[in-house]
Image (cartoon, rainbow, N blue to C red):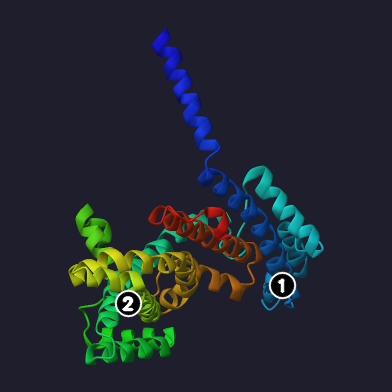
Amino acid sequence: MTSSKISVETSRDWLIGLVTSETFIYVVKRLLQALLTILLASALSFFIMKLAPGDYVDTLRQNPKISPERIDELKRQFGLDQPWHIQYGLWLWRIITRGDFGTSFIYQRSVASLLWERIPATLLLAIASLVVTWAIAIPLGIVAAVKQNRATDRILQVVSYAGQGFPSFITALLLLIFAQITSPIFPVGGMTSINHSELTWFGKIIDIAWHMILPTIALSITSFAGLQRITRGELLDVLRQDYIQTARAKGLPENRVIYVHALRNAINPLITLLGFELASLLGGAFIAEFFFNWPGLGRLTYQAVLAKDEYLVLASLVMSAVLLIIGNLVADLMLKAADPRIRLENLN
């Protein structure tokens, strides 16, 4: 009985400690702010879409096989006969009460089901690009800082400037040309091969990874160039600090000075950029998805915009905002974990 009472009190104390902790309060506060942000962003997006002339049903008027009566029926079915604020209010109410994001006009399917199909592909591409970018850019940025103003540093600066100067669509086009020249080494188009369903589980992973190579490179080049330059600049600033000179004067090995003392302080601004980096990759994924026929969220949103599929466009924009908020929140928590001296309340 006594041990049971102690266990209950321990659990209660742990729960109270969790709820009152700085991290928990910060996460709750950010999530509440996110709800307001998403609400305002969705309302603004819906209003801007309504400023564009015409709607999905108007495109059907060009088909002589569809009668005016059928057009009016479709308008009532999709709620397009209502003022824009009524349409938005009904859409928002369905989400709150039923979790229903509406029905896609062109696919005649639930918008939520379409998003759940496409989001994993976009996240897979974005996360793969993020890993590749950081795995290459951080070491090269360190090398450029350590060898400042030498031949290696100058070559890496030229590479970074060239990477940032190339628009993403030019990079994608060059990679497509490269794929055609080296065909059939690199697959172009789609996420899987024709015989994907016949492969083993390991073979399916290899098949998807092989299809990801060119889209990941196209998505990573610009981000890699910018991150390399930022890493170089941050590390150079830290290496000029007095405590680094003191560490060297004490006879510490240069590798320990750079990787233990300098890099730990230079990495904090890079972690802050992580959330924005993920958001930019999600936004820039459209280029890679479009050119390489990748079945992701960006390509779906583009097709919805062309067809004026309002509910699908709106839900896609909201989902992009959610992913941006989550990315920034994860970056803040990682920054707190990397440097306990940082107070989360000062990150707002």
Q: Residue at x 26, y 61 (%)?
A: 196
Comparing labels 1 and 2, the label whose residue is closer to the camera: 2
Q: Which residue is mark 1?
A: 48
Judge left or right: residue 166 versus residue 105. Answer: left
Count neighbours of disc 2 (C-alpha within 10 A) and say few if under 14, some if 14 to 19, many if 20 or more.
some
Image quarter where the C terminus lies is bottom right
Position in image of residue 284 (x %, y %) = 47, 75
- When the figure is inspected, residue 65 is found, relative to residue 339, above or below; the finding is below
Q: Quadrant of residue 134?
A: bottom left
Q: Is 51 left or right of 282, judged from the image as shown?
A: right
Percent from the top left, x then y, of residue 180?
Answer: 27, 86
Whether residue 38 is visible, yes or no, is yes
Q: Is residue 189 visible?
A: no
Circles 1 and 2: CB distance less than 8 Å?
no
Look at label 2 and name its amino acid.
Ile
At 71% from the left and 59% from the top, the residue drawn is: 78
SS under mark 2: helix
Q: Residue furthest top?
A: 1
242 or 276, nearer to the observer: 242
Q: Earlier in the sequence, mark 1 or mark 2?
A: 1
Which percent across, then down, holds residue 131?
A: 32, 66
Position of 16 with respect to 221 (left or right) is: right
- Asked if 182 appears above or below 286 in the picture, the reply is below
Query: Label for residue 217?
Result: 2
Report the amino acid beneath label 1: Ile
Quadrant of the rendered structure where residue 292 is? bottom left
